[in-house]
Amino acid sequence: MKLALFKTLKFQVALALGVQFVLLAAVIGTTLYQLDLRKHDYIILNLAGQLRVISETIVNQSQSYVRKAPRDYSSYYRDLELYGKDLDSLVNQYDKIIVSFRERKLSPEITGQLGPIVCKWDRQSLNQLDITALNWDDFINGLYQVLGPDKAEPRLEAGAEYILAQKETLTRSSTDLANAFQLMMEGKLAQIKRLNQMAIVLSVLIAATLGLLLHFKAFRPLDKTVDGFRRVSRGDLSHQIPVAVDNEVGYMTTMFNRLTQRLAALFQLTDRINQATNLDETLQFVYQEFRGFLPIDWVGLLQKSTQQTDFTLERVYTDQAQMPGEGMHFPVDDTLLAMVLQSQRAQVKHLGSSDASGTDLTATFRTAGVCSVIALPLAAAGANDAVLVFATREAGVYEDEHLELISNISGQVSHSFDKTYGMEGLVISAVAGLAKLAESRDPETGDHLLRMSMYSAIVAQELGNDSAYSDMISPAYVRDVFRFSPMHDIGKVGVKDAILLKPGKLDDDEWTEMSRHPLIGADVLRRCEQQVSQVGYSIFQVGIEIAEGHHEKFDGSGYPHGKSGADIPLSARIVAVADVFDALTSKRPYKDAWPVEKALDVIHAESGKHFDPEVVAALERCMARIMEIYDKHKHV
């Protein structure tokens, strides 16, 4: 779980402080900038004031000139030097200011500054400037017309009278422009004031929000978390701290809740897998319990052969279709398995399309649609090297935390596997010994036990693939049929040699004695089951079914109990067909081996009588595999 940055408390606090800092910096910067602009505003106001003063001066001088207008050339030339030059100077000065205002760029010539000043005015000021400039254009054009074309001797009296006629427009537009600029400047000062007031209010709000944020998002949840820690530290692992926030405190709480859940689950996991009575249960419990910690679609146990020539997929547990099954073999130098055993550490492998080729484990997984694998060494599981593998079809889901979890609990898992795997090893040895004991009483059967056990396993597997019994048959069931089918005649150890080895036909008493061997075998295995059940294991149940029921017939005419149909255990019905098929196709002292076709005809004829029709059909469907065993180990 990775907390999004924007949800973290440090980000939110930093954001609030950052916003406050940016706000204050912006306000200070804006205020300083506006204050700096005020210098320009004063220059603009001064120039606007100059326009008003110039316009009033032009009007006043024109009034004086009209009252004392010259009556001869000498006074005219005198006034031309005085009034005329002043008028020309004032008009030029006014015109320069208006032109600069129009261009929004005040030249150093009229401001006295080192560089030009760029003006930014509000709409009201610009509108008034347009009016004032237009009035000035009309005024100056009219004035030049009245003064006449002769620049050396202009009509000063006519010009003065024209100025007096236009004085209202000239002075009013100049005054209005100065007033508009004055209002604009006052508006800017008011804006700066409002900006500072808003900044103060926002700073207070941000500070208050930050305080509330820390209270609700940090301090109060932290108090609840500390109280939860206290309860959990006292051993209450079931207690979950409410996750009230989605920041670091909430993340910490979530992680702590997950920790307590995992601790409780690990206790439960350890307890449950230690309750397993066999390797299949252990694998099933691991599959079911580990799914609470990481995605799993398949779990399997692989072991290096005694000869160190390859790895065998010994056990599998999955609820997914089209996944690798038991009995598969992989090269001893398989990259993933060899790496795990060499490093003695769990390894994660994310599979891509390039992993789909080859014969190794990863290629098999990729072909089955597996995308992610975790392999864990089980050094304690049995005498040979073993690897526990978790797999899922989800891509890229195994992370470092999953690998760390698997590594941390590998000891408990290895111990559980070692216990059940070791127990199964003892059972296999006991089964093999008992089977050999039974075989030693009838040494003329050749490899009968080997062949019929393989036949039985193949038929059982076929029934699990496609039959009315598919739901009853699992890989573990097939394995038990394979292991215990050699013990079908274990009861013959209780039959007298005189009867068991009699070359001729048995009389009624002898037959009655011989027909007891299923009961004797079942009783022997029940006593074995009672012994192992005292230490929490159940191992021999399928063996008991096979030993007691393999001479029962589907129509109820068999022995020792005369059971029929589904009352006969399925394992016994499977072994009955495999046993008879091998007996018919094998050489015995009293007969030659029958051709396979003839044996199949007999078995088919007995379908529904001696044999279960479903089992017979399964035998016929898998004859290709049966014949491989027959050709390799036949006794003819």
Image (tube, grey):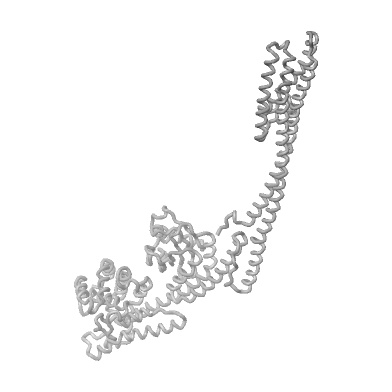
Residue 79 at what x, y percent from top left?
Answer: 79, 13
Residue 303 visible: no
Which residue is located at x 29 percent, y 77 percent? Answer: 573
Quarter placement of the C terminus: bottom left
Residue 77 rendering spot, x and y as whole percentages: 78, 10
Q: In screen coordinates, is 319 left or right of 202?
A: left
Residue closest to the eye, 160 or 297: 160
For residue 508, say whether it is visible: yes
Q: Residue furthest top?
A: 73
Residue 635 placed where, x, y %? 25, 73
Total residue callouts: 0
**Residue in the picture at 74% in, 31% down:** 45
* Front residue of this view, candidates 155 and 100: 155
Residue sitting farthest toward the bottom: 509
Q: Position of residue 558 (x, y in %)?
A: 25, 83
**Image quadrant in which you'd find residue 323:** bottom left
**Quarter placement of the N terminus:** bottom right
- Left/right placement of residue 109 relative to residue 433 reads right
Give the residue displayed 69% in from the left and 18% down from the top.
143
Q: Image point 45% across, 77% down: which residue?
A: 277
Q: Nearer the viewer, residue 380 or 623?
A: 623
| 287 lies above or below 154 | below
